[in-house]
Amino acid sequence: MAEPARIADLPTVATALAGSFVRVVAVTERIAPGAVFSHRPLKQLALLATWAGGAECLCDGQSFSQRPGTLAWIAPRCELEECSGPSGWEVSYLMLEGTLADRIAQTIRDSGTPAFVYHPSRRTWRQAMSEAVAAARDRPDGWAWILLARIALLAELAATTPAPLGEGGGILDLACRLVDRAPDRSWSTAELAASLGVGVRTLTQRFSRLTGMPPARWVRRRRLGHARVLIERGAPVGETAARLGFANPFHFSRAFKREFGLPPSAAIRSGAGATGLHGSD
């Protein structure tokens, strides 16, 4: 029978536990409205927590929304695209590598989805996420214990209350899928409402509550978000305009600048390096 750990053994145990994560990156940031990021593919397991604002995301071609209170576990090697909402996006995220991260990632993949996106009802997740980020970022004494305990709690919440992509996403997720399947289509409010099976007034009210903008503007932002991703990957502006259904490149450039505050030629790719999702260390 193994002897119980003694107080003198705790530093050694903590070192072994820290080995469960061979690399940890922790960031909290506020992202400006309309920012677009493209990660092809993610290099680490990612855990994202949205505190305020939000973002529309595509993960391996499947759409989901980040809203205040959303937690998202995203498996490595997924292709992730994000476009922050009209009020910006305040988000904390952990990028994790190691044996424990591998186990969590395998659980996600075994479910047949690239991510778990869920809204835990228990308020304890907010404190757990805040403490996990602080422990990973500041590395206080005993940080490995703190991080592992908080990650275990957050993983347990994912196991008991997951909402895999494509389930229960609501009217906004359905609209995302429609627009993403045909980003070259302008989609009038009436057309979008009819395709979603609701009235124009209902659609307008729900979009105002969920996104802070009318449906037509949201569609334009979504389409231009796709355009920005293409341009940041090196696609020619004229070709991108045509691909997104803009017959006149000048009108496309003007709409792009009005939406993002910069012309298409100035769009700079914001990719995910080994350090973080949005270029943060």
Image (spheres, rainbow, N blue to C red):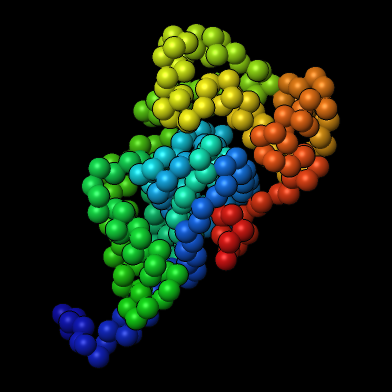
* Residue 167 in sight from this viewpoint: yes
Using the image, determine if residue 4 lies above or below residue 229.
Answer: below
x, y percentage for residue 5?
21, 83
Which residue corresponds to the image point at 50% horizontal and 65% vertical from the top-left? 25
Left or right for 59, reference 168: right
Q: At 23% from the left edge and 47% from the top edge, which residue is drawn?
A: 122
Quadrant of the rendered image containing residue 115: top left
Front-lying residue, 257 or 238: 257
In percent of the image, x 61 and y 44: which residue is there? Answer: 35
What quarter of the picture does the C terminus occupy? bottom right
Q: Position of residue 92 (x, y in %)?
A: 45, 55
Is residue 173 visible from the viewing direction of this image? no
Question: As drawn, is 254 to the left or to the right of 22?
Answer: right
Say left or right for 243 vs 196.
right
Indicate whether 263 appears above or below 188.
below
Residue 118 rendering spot, x and y as whole percentages: 35, 41
Q: Residue at x 76, y 22 (%)?
A: 246
Occupied quadrant, residue 149: bottom left
Q: Position of residue 141 (x, y in %)?
A: 34, 81
Q: Nearer the viewer, residue 66 or 181?
A: 66
Numbered label tally: 0
Which quarter of the figure is the N terminus placed in?
A: bottom left
